[in-house]
Image (cartoon, grey):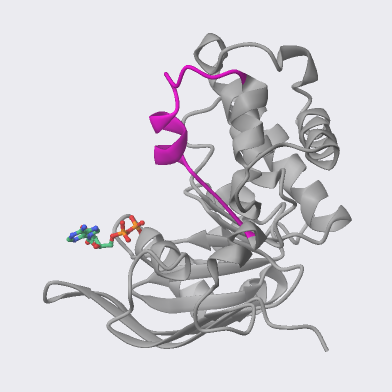
Amino acid sequence: MSVTIISVRELSFQYNSAEVLAEVSFDVTPGDYIGLVGPNGSGKTTLIRILLGLLMPSAGTVSLFGRSSLDFREWYKVGYLSQRFMASYHHFPATVKEIVSMGLLSKKRFPKRMGSSDEMAIEKALECMDIVDIKDKLIHELSGGQQQRVFIARTIVNEPDLLILDEPTAAVDPETRERFFNLLENLNHQKRTTIILVTHDMGSIGKYASKMMYLDKRVIFYGTFEEFCRSTDMSSLFGSLSQHLICHRHE
Ligand code: ADP
């Protein structure tokens, strides 16, 4: 029997006295690819921060890989990438290869020396992102799309079981975004990486993800796109035309 990757029960969260998340319950199973959507301020980032252990819930429980808190030696199982993280590294004086190798540090104890298996993992991540030929360039010399590929390589170099991405395509062109979506689809299909992708791009996510969570303080919808497509509640919320444009399950 496979372990549930994430299990959330009756979670709520408040900033001071403002309730941001209420009665949130859901499970994520291995191989899920979830598009997390919802209006601005609906609690998506807060939920991700709670999943990562950066915020404590006001009530309810969260477990990752069957445990209530992840031991630091297991952090490598989770890859996390956000727009804010990428922006903070824009002017970092490091080469592409150095940035990708930093992704391996969470798996290491002292001494943090690189061995031949690390070198192979780095090469594989560089190849996977098609950035081998720019591996010695400094990060700030690259275009936004190239930088994004470098940070994804850094995130996947550990081959995490769970990948959490918070709006990583907000600032890139449509072609790069399409390529990024295809890449995630490959990781999900070929490596069975479980993915949670926070996105504004509700119109496209149905082409790639297997499930959608629509959050607005509460979980308004969580299920497959086929279920979304058949849901009368979602027809009332979005209108049946938008509902079917979102689900991408019709010709
Ligand atoms: P989303 O990611 O869906 O846009 P957020 O989780 O960032 O939503 O924010 C949810 C709500 O919590 C918003 O009303 C936001 O203003 C508020 N909020 C976010 N961060 C803080 C904070 N550090 N202190 C107080 N309120 C916050």
- Quick check: 148 above or below 61? above
Q: Nearer the viewer, residue 10 or 95?
A: 95
Q: Is residue 177 visible?
A: no
Is 190 magenta? The answer is no
Magenta stretch containing residue 85, yes or no? yes
Residue 130 rendering spot, x and y as whole percentages: 79, 25
Quadrant showing the C terminus: bottom right
Of residues 230 and 63, the one nearer the viewer is: 63
Q: Residue at 11% across / 76% down in the picture?
A: 17
Instruction: Pick out the residue farthest to the left.
Output: 17
Q: In which quarter of the image is ligand 1?
A: bottom left
If the image is split into quadrants, where does the N terminus sit? bottom right
What residue sits 56% from the left and 76% below the top? 222
* Residue 156 drawn at (x, y percent): 70, 45
Image coords of residue 13 (percent x, y): 28, 77
Residue in view at x 60 percent, y 57 percent? 246
Q: Residue 124: x, y in percent?
A: 83, 35
Q: Where is residue 60, by image quadrant?
A: bottom left
| Nearer to the camera, 110 or 153 | 110
- Which span of residues is magenta-colored? 78-95
Residue under the image location 33 percent in, 75 percent down: 56
| Relative vertical location of residue 41 with respect to residue 102 in this rendering, above or below | below
Say which quarter of the image contains residue 24: bottom left
